[in-house]
Structures are given as structure tokens and as C-alpha cells.
Image (spheres, helix red, strand yellow):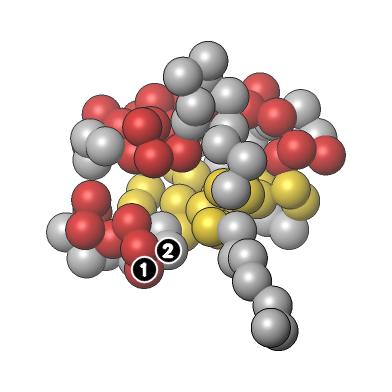
Amino acid sequence: MSVTIRVPTTLRTLTGGASEVAVEGTTVSQVLDQLEGVHPGFKERLLDAEGGLRRFVNLYVADDDVRFREGLETAVADGDTVSIIPAVAGGAA
């Protein structure tokens, strides 16, 4: 199943500047494994030492945050888009 991963600007150095990468997989975990195989360095940026999603990284399948679905075991369908969205912090002083 072909899935498109949208890569934020801050991680495009890992993809040679590409904003989107096509990979195969039926779950978010499999998609991330494929992404790591093609463009090494993603897992250490996205996952913590226990293999869970870092708290400052958000992953969406279509428009759904995987944290509110099945986490890294969230199913993806052929043609789905997985978006990597770094958390934004800050505010007025």
C-alpha cells in the first residue's frame, strides 16, 4: 500500500529537501520503518528510547492525530497521507 509522508521543513535535510516521500505499509509503525530504511535518521527524531512517539512530535493520518487512534499501530490505507507535525511552543511574554 502506497502512503505519502509529508515532511516538515525542519526534517527535510534527511530527505534531500523533499517535502513528500512515498513509502509502503499498513500501519504508521510500518510506514516509519520504511521511511527510516529509505531516509535514515527519522526514527531517532520521531521516537523516544522506548519506541514511543516523542511528545513534541505529532503524527496525523489524513486529519486524525494518531494519539487519539491506535498510536503507532494506527492503520493506513492505500493513498493515505501521514503528516509529521512538530509541536509549536511559546506565547506572549
Counting every numbered tag in the picture gives: 2
- Image quadrant for the C terminus? bottom right
- Tell me what residue is drawn at x 56 percent, y 42 percent: 78
In the image, residue 20 sits, relative to residue 53, either above or below, namely below
Q: Is residue 90 above or below residue 22?
A: below
Residue positioned most to the bottom:
92
Residue 31 in the image, given as x and y percentages of width and height: 46, 33
Say if residue 17 shows up in the picture: yes
Mark 1 Cα-neighbour bin, 10 Å: few <14, some 14–19, many ≥20: few
Farthest top residue in view: 50
Residue that mark 1 sits on: 9
Judge whether 67 appears above or below 51 on screen.
below
Relative to 71, 57 lies left or right: left
Q: Position of residue 36 (x, y in %)?
A: 31, 32
Pointer 2: what residue? 8
Residue depicted at x 53% and y 57%: 86
Q: Residue 1 at what x, y percent from top left?
A: 49, 35
Query: Are the residues flagged by discs 1 and 2 in contact, CB closer than 8 Å?
Result: yes
Q: Secondary structure at mark 2?
A: loop
Question: What amino acid is at disc 2?
Answer: Pro
Q: CA distance from mark 1 to mark 2?
A: 4 Å
> Residue 27 vs residue 67: left or right?
left
Query: What residue sits 58% from the left and 33% below the top?
Result: 53
Residue 27 in sight in this render: no
- Residue at disc 1, secondary structure: helix
Q: Residue at x 63, y 65 (%)?
A: 89
Provide residue 72's location: percent of width, then percent of height: 62, 27
Identified by mark 1, the residue type is: Thr
Residue 20: image quadrant is bottom left
